[in-house]
Image (cartoon, grey):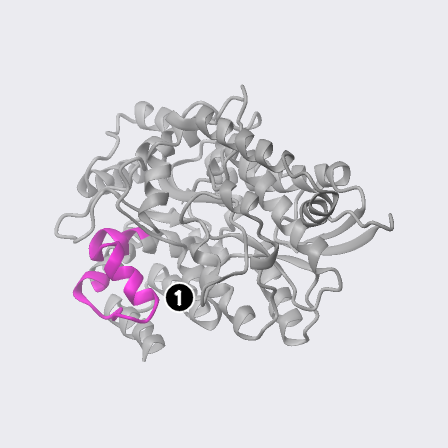
Amino acid sequence: MKKNLLKVLSTLLATTLVLGALGGCGGKAASNENTSVNKQEKNAASTGVKEDGKQVTITLWSQFSDPNSTDGNYAAFYHALESIKTDMPDINVVHEGTESESYKVKLKTAMAGNELPDVFFNWGSGTMKPFVDAGLVLSLDEYMTDDIKSRILGGTLDNFTFDGKVYGYPYSVAVASLYINTELFEQNHVKVPETYDEFLNAVDAFKSAGVTPISLGEKDLWPGLMIFGIHAIRMAGADAFNAALTGEASYDTPELVKAAKLVQELSVRGGFGESALGTSEDDAVAAFKQGKAAMMFMGSWLNGDCEAEDAAVKGKIDVIKFPVIEGGKGNSEEFHGGSGETFLVSSNTEHPVEAAAVAQYICEKMSKDQYLAGSGMPAWEADMGEAAVNRLSSEIANLTKDATGYVYWLDSVTGGSKADTLMDEISKLIANTETPEEFCKNLQKMNE
């Protein structure tokens, strides 16, 4: 992630009002256009309004399958979907939401048959590359006006840019942290961990007390990527781990073998409870919300769930940095996360101007709303007004203020079959069916 993004994140809390002012300046500049032609062109690019008054239908796919979810990203997406009816009255958006893992299969099938919708959700980085390489998605450069560019925070386009061309807009900067149930820590007289040894002591203490130490929904496979990811960052360091993920360095190193060993040992000692491999992510989140687990390592989209009105843990959750591991090359200012999720536009769409406008509208609208809902930091400038910011989002912004490096979600960086291999191998690691040495050698085969 670029240095200017890190600077933005470090000053986010202190600059909310400034960002609002900047957003206002952008609007003022746009209103000064003094020719009817320019106004019509800008209107078409930003709202999709057709001069003949006919409504255009844009098909949209996403992984946001539950309109009633308290997950901040879901809430923000459905808010954008609803408001687009008023703000873009000449566009009829037909949405299909599919649960995350099923959505991945759906995309692969549509890609193979060249039957993609006009606009569709994607995780960015490595998962986007096959679509770009196959010419299936539209470059957004010609639709990205100077006014739009001025509102996008620096560095947030990195994971959507290939060969100098931009294919997606950002909407969030998400960071994974260690969520802790302060009530359970206090009731069981367990110290909030500042070191890795204290983290393991906490795991043992909660296991002895009959409380699940770390809630993990490994049935869905991707959650295991996160727990391995942070161990790898702490042991190898962000730069070295990023190099392995992109094929520029080896997975088969002493540091990554050690990271794998620590994850396996954590599983064997009961850190994830008795049934992590049979627990879905939804059930893992539900258990944490109900106060049945002491910790959870997850992305900032968990903030909304923790502060939801139906959460038994509302007001009882704190976020902390994952502890530094003694002997590791990583440090406490390196984080798992970044900006990556987006909406792509099919190169076969019959309405490229309108489709691009829908993608831009949803991303910018979600950027503000998901932040206020507590799912991550915004990737666009916006006036937050007097709205209360989610408490946990504020804490995470403070945690990351001195960030020196990021590693984005492992399945997004690698993409395709490599992501599948990563998930399968980590699942085996957690199940204790292969050694850490075998694990790293199997991963390195992807880079050969």
Relative to residue 382, is residue 54 depicted above or below?
Answer: below
Residue closer to the observer: 167 or 317: 167
Which of the 4 image quadrants contains residue 364?
Answer: top right
Relative to residue 375, is residue 230 depicted above or below?
Answer: below
Q: Main secondary structure of the magenta part?
A: helix
User: Residue visible at 37% across and 67% down?
Assistant: 425
Spot occupied by residue 245 in the image (x, y as percentages of width and height): 34, 65
Residue closer to the observer: 389 or 141: 141
Number of marks present in the image shown: 1
- Residue at the front extreme of this rendering: 35
Spot occupied by residue 332 in the image (x, y as percentages of width and height): 23, 42
Residue closer to the observer: 209 or 265: 265
- The region drawn magenta spans 230-257
Q: Is residue 425 magenta?
A: no
* Left or right position of 5 against 359: left
For mark 1, what is the residue? 422
Spot occupied by residue 241 in the image (x, y as percentages of width and height): 27, 60
Q: Is residue 248 magenta?
A: yes
User: Residue visible at 32% across and 39% down?
Assistant: 7
Which of the 4 image quadrants contains residue 349?
Answer: bottom right
Q: Quadrant of the C terminus?
A: bottom left
Relative to residue 178, is residue 132 depicted above or below?
Answer: below
* Left or right position of 107 against 124: right
Spot occupied by residue 372 in the image (x, y as percentages of width and height): 53, 30
Question: For the residue marked with disc 1, what is the amino acid?
Answer: Leu
Q: Is residue 14 visible?
A: yes
Residue closer to the observer: 392 or 20: 20
